[in-house]
Image (spheres, rainbow, N blue to C red):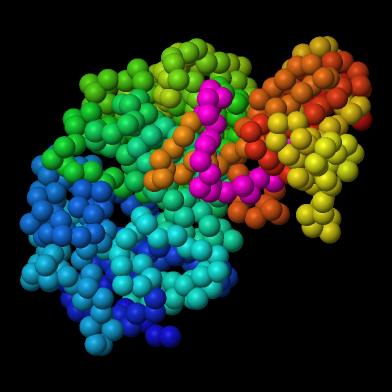
C-alpha cells in the first residue's frame, strides 16, 4: 500500500500524485473529508494540523454530484460568500463535495471532471483565493464522491480504515496545512480511534427537522468527551434557508453546534439564503465559543425528560476567584430578533471557560427554572452570549421564559462551587428481574439487568431503597448501557408521546430509549436514556433523575421500557445527605 501526498496537497506549488487505496482526501488549502474512520493504530501520531473547527460552505445540497456541478456556478457561490461578508466572519472553507472527480489517471493521481472544471482545479482554487476562501475537496472509498451518503459498515472497517490511516499519514508527512475530516456515521466499533482526524462524523446526515436535531444530540452523548483541540465531533451540516425548521430551531442548532465545537459547515444555495440566517451565522458570540482555544465540547449533564436537557463544557483561560469562568447554554433563542443578532458581543475578560447548555424540549414557550447545582455551582454571574447583555448575579436557581424548541446562550463568571452529592450504590445484582429481564455478565467484573421487554413485558425492580429525611424528590444516579443504534424501523415516539411515521430518507430512531420509572407502585416518571455508546459494554455512568421517594428504607423502584426494549441497567445509586451517610 502506498500513498504519495508530497505533490497535490499544495496546488499553488505542485501537481497531485496519489496512489489510491480505496479512500482519499485531497486538500488544496484548508479542508477535505472522507467517509471512513480509523479503527486501527490509535497509539500513533496525533491528528494532522488544523486546531480549530472548520467553518465554511459545502456544495452538496445546492448542486449534488452530477451535471449541476459547474465551475461557473461554484464561482457565483464564492462571490456571494464574499459579498455577504461570510468569508470575513470566518466561513472561509469552500468545499466541493462531489462531482469534481473522474476516477484516476494512470499514475494513480485523481482526475478532475472536465465537464465541471474545464481548465482543471488550480484556476478555480486561485479564484477562491481572491475571495479570501480556501478550496476543500471531499472523497470516499471507490470511484464516487458522495460525502453524505456512504455508511461504513463494521465488516468493511478494517480494510477501509487501513487505507484511511495510510492517507492520513501521507497528509501529515507532506507537511501541508490541512484540516482532515472523516465520516464514520456513528457505526465504527471504537470511537476513540477517530481522534486521529481533525473532525469525525458522529452520525448520518442531519435533516431539516427538529427530530433530526434530537437524534444528533443524543448521538453526541457518548463521544462528546473525546473531543480536544484539533480533533472535533462533526455534527453534520447546519440546516439553513427555506426548510422545515423554524427560525428558533435554526438558532438552537447553530448555538448547540458552536458549543459542541462542531465544524460550522452549511450547504445552502446562497442566492436563497435569508438575512436572518446570514445575521445568525455572522454573530461573533457563538463563533468565539466555537473557535475557543481549548477546543473541548460541551458534554451531557442532566436530562429532565419532556422538559429540558443540561449540557456543559470547558473553554480556555479566564479563571476567577472560584477558579473558572463558565458559559451557560440553555436552548431558548426564540426571543432574539435579527437586530439582536447583529449587535456585537461585549468584550469579556479572558477567554470563555465553560459552557453549560440547557435544552427546551417543549413545543411551546414556557417558564424554566435552572438549578445551578446541575452545573456544579451554587452561584454565578450571567451574561447573554448572543447580545452580551449582563443578566447579573444569580444564586441557587435562575428562572427564565424559554421559547418552544428555543435556546438561551449564557456566559457564567464569578462562580462558586456547589457541594458534590454523595450516593449509596445498589448494583443490578441486588434488583429483581421482572418478566423477560435477565441478569447478564457485561465483563468479568460487571453485571447488568438486560432483555427488559417493552410495555410491561419486562422490568428491573429495586426494593428497600432509602429515601430522604422527608417525603419528596431525591436525586438518583443510574448507570446503564444503551447501544440501540438508529435503524430503519417505521415509527418513533415524539417527546409528546405521539407516534409519528417518517419518510424513507429520515432515520426514525432518535438515539434514545424511553422508560417509565414507577416509585412505590404509584408515582410514575418518564425518563429518556440516550445511547451510551456503540457496543453493549459501553456504560453511561451517573445519569441523574429526581424520584419522589418516601422517608425510610422501604422504597421500591421499577424501571420498564415504553414502546420498545429498555436499556440494560448496571446500578442505581441514591443521594445520601450528610446526616444519612454511613
Bounds of the magenta span? Answer: 477-499
Residue 74 occupies quadrant: bottom left
The correct choice, above or below, for 400 with respect to 10 in the image is: above
| Front residue of this view, candidates 74 and 227 | 74
Q: How many labels does the image show?
A: 0
Answer yes or no: is residue 578 visible. no
Q: Is residue 101 covered in magenta?
A: no
Q: Which residue is drawn at 33% across and 26% down?
A: 246
Q: What percent of the width, then of the height, locates residue 313?
A: 52, 39
Residue closer to the observer: 561 or 106: 561
Image-quadrant location for residue 174: bottom left
Task: Name the side, left or right, on which 71 lies relative to 227.
Answer: left
Residue ranking furthest to the bottom: 107
Image coords of residue 153 (percent x, y): 51, 63
Residue at 72% x, 20% y: name it: 524
In this picture, residue 369 sits left or right of residue 129: right
In this view, the residue in front, 301 or 209, is: 209
Amino acid at each position: 500500500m502506498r500513498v504519495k501526498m508530497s505533490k497535490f496537497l499544495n496546488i499553488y506549488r505542485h501537481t497531485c500524485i496519489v496512489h489510491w487505496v480505496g479512500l482519499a482526501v485531497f486538500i488544496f488549502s484548508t479542508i477535505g473529508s472522507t467517509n471512513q474512520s480509523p479503527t486501527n493504530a490509535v497509539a500513533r501520531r496525533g491528528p494532522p494540523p488544523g486546531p480549530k473547527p472548520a467553518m465554511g460552505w459545502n456544495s452538496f445540497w445546492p448542486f449534488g454530484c452530477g451535471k449541476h456541478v459547474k465551475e461557473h456556478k461554484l464561482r457565483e457561490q464564492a462571490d456571494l460568500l464574499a459579498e455577504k461578508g461570510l468569508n470575513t466572519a470566518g466561513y472561509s472553507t469552500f468545499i466541493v463535495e462531489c462531482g469534481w472527480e473522474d476516477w484516476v489517471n494512470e499514475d494513480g493521481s485523481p482526475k478532475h471532471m472536465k465537464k465541471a472544471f474545464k481548465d482543471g482545479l488550480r484556476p478555480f482554487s486561485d479564484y477562491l483565493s481572491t475571495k479570501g476562501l480556501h478550496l476543500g475537496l471531499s472523497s470516499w472509498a471507490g470511484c464516487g464522491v458522495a460525502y453524505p451518503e456512504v455508511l461504513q459498515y463494521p465488516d468493511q472497517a478494517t480494510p477501509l480504515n487501513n487505507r484511511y490511516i495510510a492517507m492520513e499519514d501521507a497528509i501529515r508527512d507532506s507537511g501541508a496545512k490541512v484540516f482532515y475530516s472523516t465520516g464514520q456515521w456513528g457505526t465504527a466499533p471504537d470511537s476513540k480511534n477517530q481522534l486521529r482526524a481533525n473532525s469525525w462524523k458522529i452520525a448520518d446526515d442531519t435533516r431539516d427537522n427538529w427530530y433530526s436535531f434530537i437524534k444528533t444530540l443524543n448521538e453526541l452523548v457518548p463521544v462528546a468527551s473525546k473531543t480536544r483541540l484539533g480533533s472535533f465531533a462533526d455534527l453534520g451540516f447546519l440546516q439553513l434557508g427555506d426548510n422545515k425548521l423554524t427560525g428558533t430551531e435554526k438558532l438552537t442548532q447553530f448555538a448547540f453546534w458552536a458549543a459542541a465545537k462542531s465544524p460550522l459547515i452549511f450547504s445552502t444555495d446562497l442566492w436563497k439564503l435569508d438575512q436572518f440566517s446570514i445575521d445568525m451565522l455572522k454573530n461573533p458570540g457563538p463563533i468565539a465559543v466555537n473557535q475557543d482555544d481549548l477546543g473541548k465540547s460541551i458534554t451531557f449533564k442532566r436530562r429532565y425528560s419532556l422538559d429540558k436537557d443540561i449540557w456543559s463544557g470547558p473553554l480556555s483561560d479566564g479563571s476567577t476567584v472560584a477558579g473558572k469562568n463558565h458559559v451557560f447554554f440553555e436552548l431558548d433563542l426564540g426571543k432574539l430578533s435579527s437586530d439582536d443578532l447583529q449587535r456585537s458581543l461585549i468584550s469579556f475578560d479572558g477567554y470563555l471557560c465553560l459552557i453549560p447548555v440547557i435544552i427546551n424540549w417543549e413545543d411551546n414557550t414556557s417558564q424554566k427554572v435552572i438549578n445551578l447545582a446541575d452545573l456544579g455551582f451554587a452561584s454565578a454571574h450571567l451574561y447573554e452570549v448572543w447580545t452580551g447583555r449582563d443578566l447579573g448575579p444569580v444564586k441557587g436557581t435562575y428562572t427564565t421564559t424559554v421559547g418552544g424548541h428555543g435556546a438561551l446562550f449564557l456566559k457564567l463568571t464569578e462562580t462558586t462551587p456547589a457541594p458534590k452529592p454523595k450516593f449509596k450504590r445498589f448494583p443490578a445484582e441486588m434488583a429483581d428481574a421482572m418478566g423477560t429481564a435477565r441478569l447478564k455478565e457485561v465483563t468479568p467484573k460487571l453485571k447488568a439487568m438486560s432483555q427488559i421487554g417493552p410495555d410491561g413485558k419486562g422490568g428491573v425492580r429495586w426494593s428497600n431503597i432509602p429515601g430522604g429525611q422527608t417525603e419528596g424528590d431525591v436525586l438518583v444516579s443510574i448507570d446503564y448501557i444503551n447501544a440501540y443504534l438508529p435503524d430503519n424501523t417505521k415509527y418513533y415516539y415524539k417527546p409528546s408521546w405521539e407516534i409519528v411515521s417518517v419518510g424513507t430518507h429520515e432515520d426514525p430512531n432518535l438515539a434514545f430509549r424511553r422508560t417509565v420509572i414507577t416509585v412505590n407502585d404509584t408515582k410514575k416518571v418518564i425518563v429518556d436514556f440516550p445511547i451510551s455508546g456503540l457496543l453493549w459494554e459501553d456504560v453511561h455512568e451517573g445519569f441523574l433523575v429526581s424520584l419522589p421517594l418516601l422517608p425510610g428504607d422501604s422504597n421500591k423502584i421499577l424501571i420498564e421500557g415504553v414502546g420498545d426494549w429498555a436499556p440494560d441497567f448496571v446500578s442505581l445509586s441514591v443521594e445520601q445527605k450528610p446526616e444519612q451517610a454511613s
